[in-house]
Amino acid sequence: MPSAAGCDDNQRSRQKERDVFSGVIVPEKPDRNAIEVRGVSKRFGIGENAFKALDNVSVTIRENEFFTLLGPSGCGKTTLLRLIAGFDFPTEGQIMLHGQDIAPLPPFKRPVNTVFQSYALFPHMTVGQNIGFGLEMLGKPKAEVKARVDQMLRLVRMEALKDRRTSQISGGQQQRVALARALAPSPKVLLLDEPLSALDYKLRKEMQSELKRLQTETGITFIFVTHDQEEALTMSDRIAVMSAGKILQVGAPWEIYDRPADRFVADFIGETNFLPGTLGAIENGRTTVTLSSGAMLPATLAEGYVPNGPATIVVRPEHARAIREGGDLRGQVENIVYFGTDTHIHVRLDDRNLFTVRQQNSRSRDCGFVVGDAVGVAIAPDGAQVLKD
Amino acid sequence: MSAASEAETRFEREDTRRRWLLSTPALLIILVAAVGPLLVVLLYSFLAPGSYGDVRWQFSSDAWFNVFLERDIFDDTLAPAWAHLSIFWRSMKLAFITTLLTLVFGFPTAYFIATRDERTREIWLFLITIPFWTNLLIRTFALQEVIRQEGLLNTLLLKLGLISQPIPMLFTDFAIGLGMTYVYLPLMVLPLYASMERIDFRIVEAGYDLYASRFGVLRRIIVPLVKPGIIAGSILVFIPSLGAYVTPRVLGGGKSMMLGNLIELQFGQGRNWPLGAALSIALMAIVMIALLFYVRNASRGGPTHG
Ligand SMILES: Nc1ncnc2c1ncn2[C@@H]1O[C@H](COP(=O)(O)OP(=O)(O)OP(=O)(O)O)[C@@H](O)[C@H]1O
Ligand SMILES: [Mg+2]
């Protein structure tokens, strides 16, 4: 999205350039929404054996957005991408691209490219030929294809391997070729199905910032699939958390992390402590909870949630502190795990629940506790949230 | 030489020896059953014909001479043996057309089977091999029954009112083409299927994703990957159809003689074994030359594109 009115012109000319480049018909006046998924369900199989891979999914992805689908294995992320790319068709619902229903367009007429989870490189072509394939199919002149291929090779740091067969390069290198191949035709929307999963930590970090830079510069809308919540949190403009064919929550990374809509989201993103509690009076989305220890905490409510009776409270480990005396909860140190930048202290509370506290490490390295110590847990003001179960 | 590389060479040497040992039985069979008879045929082609078939043990190059040239009975002038040459030509044409037809019909068939799920695939493959269960001669006569004047096909077409006169099909080139395609189709489908089965069809989706049309995907992705199967299938069909002899005889009515029939004639009624032997060797030479060109061209084009 253009951040200021001033860059609008620039934006538009780049837009035009891209349309010419991709050679694919796009509507004259692009809508602000790149992709709209409207009530889409996907069933595999028929009758008794039917399996609902997507269940009434609706989501809107804005133009030039870095949108991430995050969820456990088998929740339907790849299925959703395949519907957008056109390899499969929704059983119910509609998918709009720039405000137009794309159902009648075959995959090769959609200005959408995919980085496949399985790479799906052409085994009979070299790295360079793989990357140039899309442009060639669009009928670009040879010189233009070559220049673009070289540019892409530089981008993914594969210049030296241009003439290798794809069967003669490593998994991580194959993944980079898949990325370059999908980027080369400058699609309007790029679908990335776990494109960095096979890379080592350092290269992954580099490619992450490279991708992010590319996305802001080219104005391509990214729909990015990952298992890695840290990757999702650091890269995305917005995240959709999926589970069992449903989208549970869509929001900015901080919203997903700090205001999880339900127990699944809270549990899936980051580490979370769940505590039973009783709610007091509600005022402006805020309330006071009484914990089992009798301690009272101020807490926020998940949006649109009208609770009744006992509730579950979530507290992130970094919003709590371990102290010797006092605290909101008491317990015993059960385990201490060193993580480099911080240390996790697992506390067995008096009500037998487990609570994790994360503490920054100082130079002394010693967190001040040993296993078996009696310990108190102090929860930061504003550190607790009432969960919609 | 380091101890490690020494161990490696020793291992390699042992490995090679073991492979030789394992392949000895097969090599022996080839030697006795293929190379031996071939040498006999070659030898016979340089002997003189006996009066009641068989050969006389006397060197003669007449047979080879007669393959290509012919002496006029009246004025002793030499002319090319047009009769033989036209038979060679006709046989090559037939083999070529058969290869082409089986490829055209076999490719979609193999593609269809390769894109089914695993269990259905097995059923289709099984169906493809069913014709092998019956003798070729019987199958060919059965086909004759289908396409003859009052046969199954004509009766059906007449009943449906699509034609008013039975179409003469038996003993035509059409009949030969049909029969040959039918007989050799499995030999094309199976190697094609073997190459297609190894394709990860997700790359077909990748092709569509990168703006390749259906034809583009076929030409740039599927065909290059199936090339080994196309080569193998073409060889498997071309060679036997060049020497085909039952089908042209039964379905073509022996009206147009093929190489196989010509050779048979020399060993039978013609009582000219040396000529038959020379023709056989010539046939083999054609096959080898054709193969050499084909494989060379096919592999130069390579599995990569231009
Ligand atoms: N062609 C198919 N036929 C039947 N079931 C399928 C098919 N494709 C996917 N599924 C099922 O649909 C569900 C969603 O699959 P999908 O590939 O979208 O998961 P995913 O979220 O991408 O998982 P992962 O993170 O492991 O890649 C899975 O349970 C899968 O078994
Ligand atoms: Mg997946």
Image: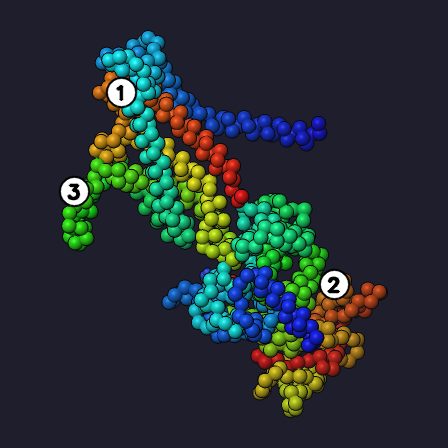
| The N terminus of chain A: image quadrant | bottom right
Mark 2 close to ligand 1, CB under 8 Å: no
Residue type at mark 2 is Phe
Q: Could you say whether the residue bearing mark 2 is in a helix, strand or loop?
A: loop
Tell me where residue B289 appears, x and y as whole percent: 43, 28
Residue type highlighted by circle 1: Phe
Rendered image: mark on residue A48: none
Q: Marks 3 and 2, Cα distance to the nearest angstrom?
A: 89 Å
For marks 1 and 3 on the same chain, the one whose residue lies earlier in the sequence: 3
Depth order, front residue of B223/B80: B80
Can you name the residue that lies furthest to the right here? A364
Closer to the camera in the image, B159 or A256: B159
Bin the neighbour count of mark 3 within 10 Å (Cα to Cα): few under 14, some 14-19, many 20 and up.
some
- Residue at point 68% right, 80% down? A384
- Residue beneath disc 2: A339
Name the residue located 68 percent from the left edge and 53 percent from the top edge.
A154
Q: What number is the disc on residue B149?
A: 3
Chain letter belonging to callout 3:
B
Distance between the Cα atoms at labels 1 and 3? 33 Å
Is there any visible trace of residue B206 in the rendered image? no
Q: Chain of mark 2?
A: A
Report how far apart the C-alphas of labels 2 and 1 lie in the structure: 89 Å
Residue carrying label 1: B267
